[in-house]
Image (cartoon, rainbow, N blue to C red):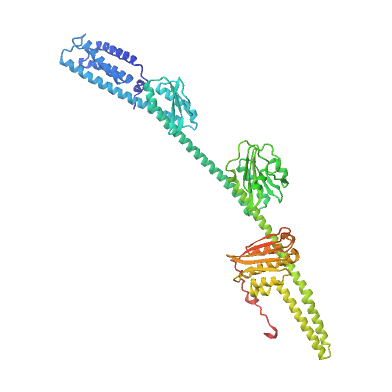
Amino acid sequence: MRSDFLLRMVRPTPPPIGVGIAVAVLLVAVETLLLLPLEPLTNPSSLPMIYLLGVVVVSMMWGLPLGFATSLISLLAFDFFYVPPTLGLSIANTRDWVTLAVFTGVALTTSALADVSRFRAEQAQESDLTAEMAGLLLNTDDVAAALPAAAQQIAHALDLPGVAIKLEAIPGNGQHSVFPLRDGATSLGTLQAPAEMPKASLRRLQEKVIPSLESLLRTTRERAAMLDSLNTGREELRLLADQQTALRRVATLVARGVSLTEVFAAVTAEVSQLLDARYTTLLRYGPDSTVTIVSTNQPALLSLVHSHWQANDGSIAGLVRRTGSAARMDDEDTASPSADSREPGIHAALGLPILVEDRLWGVVTVSSMRTEPLPADAEERIKGFTDLAATAIANADKRAELIASRARIVVAADAARRRIERDLHDGAQQRLVSIGLELRAAETSMTLEQIKAQVSDVATDLKGVLENLREISRGIHPAVLAEGGLGPALRSLARRCAVPVELDMHLDQRLPSGIEVASYYVVSESLTNVVKHAHASHVRVVAKLQGDSLRLSIRDDGAGGADPDKGSGLMGLIDRVVALGGQMTITSPAEGGTSLSATIPIGRADPPTPPAPVNAERRTRLPGGR
């Protein structure tokens, strides 16, 4: 264990050399006087050892050179006062020579050992200083606040008043010297010390203290960076967990198929909470330059829900509509999310588009009355909510389309049944009644010639009834389609059409029955619309196989303006194509003709028909029992 006495003896800056010489002389004089009462009581050869105390003290405080000088002065004093003949520097016998030689060796060795002890004590002081500074700088999160205490430790250890440590670079002046603290090319701060300081203190400061201080400051910077990284990582994980939890809540509502109003309210609330209670508004774009507020938590807009506003380019909604992508406004130039006028107190806003099947449906806007900008990753954090809103809207649209399609199928089936009933009533049924009356009349005929004539008329009428039934069945399922396939059926439609039809077909194989029937009716209904409504002079029909899809295109040069919602039969065609997994688009500008394109995948096979139960089997008996 280190001796506290040695630590007290070692001072950072030794007293002046003149003081050291005076102390050495004083100690030698005191020790010489102390020997007077001890001389009769002690062996003469051991008397010189008293002088070792002064040698040790001087060597510890002023170093080895003055310690050697003190040893020589002690030797001379002892020889002068106590070695016979006294009061002179002569030595009478060999024993005295040996005593003085031993004393000289011991004194010099003691001086050297004392100097080593001084050096070790200095190292101990420096280690203690480094440990104390480490305890101050490494155990705090506020390094700047701990620097004054560290500077005080340096000042105390080196006996240098006015020491200061700054984290920034400061210039020197006449009263202070500055020592830059660096980590390579990176500045760590500045150590300020008195301009006038002993060389020993300057040496210790430059060789020992500054490197240790630089290492500690570098460690504190690395520790701070590590803590910041850990805190940032924890914060990012917390935000991610909050975001995923909020997304899961909204996704649960979407999966349950709740109303859009409930989904929009949940999106508004979750986005607002995720961005620290900032205002959130969900808007839907109208066919013109208007937007409709469908959900909001902004007080100024709560009374305007479901109302329409103009979305000019100065608003965040207008900017998103114009660009089709996310937009941000940070500063006093920010406009209201939806209105023409700026919202008082709004400093920042951003908007993310809601894309439903690549169609711009609306926008989610976030606005803030705080002076700081919105988070840099705000768009990324709320992107998932716009996707969920788009999914909910698409699901609602699909459900509405499915319900409407089912209703149209029911209506179409009822209409087809009434048409068949009407055709049978007005055609075949009337003629069969007429044939029955003719046969009743034949029963009353008297001559063979009358019977033959009436039977001939009945045969002619039966032939007409058969033709009428064939026409009806052709409307239900054309025989040419079942027998020859789609190509001959389309050629038959083209021949019967009142408008010239140009056919461009590339069909080298038979297609599944359901696809052929759907394709036939797409072309048939399109040609019927051309004849009834388009007033066209030419129609071009293209049917070709591309990969695993059948592509149909019907284009006329008529009046255009076809609208599937106006009962032209086009919605039924769309239902047929969509039911087969295909897509159908209609382009019909006014006075620009109508273009209908359909793509139907041919990978789908016709659904298998389950076998009929044995007890339900039916056999058709032909006339004559065959």
Name the image quarter holding residue 488.
Answer: bottom right
Determine whether, in the image, residue 43 is placed left or right of residue 365: left
Name the image quarter holding residue 334.
Answer: top right
**Residue lying furthest left in this view?**
93
* Whole-percent x, y for residue 485 in the image: 64, 72
* Relative vertical location of residue 289 with respect to residue 32 in this rendering, above or below: below
At a point 75% along the width and 66% down the height, the residue shown is: 532
Determine whether, in the image, residue 445 is placed left or right of residue 489: right
Q: Quadrant of the C terminus?
A: bottom right
Asked whether residue 413 appears in the rendered view, the answer is yes
Determine whether, in the image, residue 143 is placed left or right of residue 44: right
Q: In front here: 51 or 525?
A: 525
* Whole-percent x, y for residue 95 in the image: 16, 16
Q: Quadrant of the N terminus?
A: top left
**Residue lying furthest bottom in this view?**
447
**Residue lying furthest top in this view?**
87
* Whole-percent x, y for residue 411 in the image: 73, 64
At a point 71% along the width and 72% down the height, the residue shown is: 496
* Relative vertical location of residue 271 with respect to residue 578 in this rendering, above or below: above
* Relative vertical location of residue 156 with respect to residue 270 in this rendering, above or below: above
* Relative vertical location of residue 172 with respect to residue 510 in this rendering, above or below: above
Q: How many marks?
A: 0
At a point 68% along the width and 85% down the height, the residue shown is: 625
Asked whether residue 281 appears in the rendered view, the answer is no
* Whole-percent x, y for residue 280 in the image: 65, 43
At a point 55% along the width and 45% down the height, the residue shown is: 240
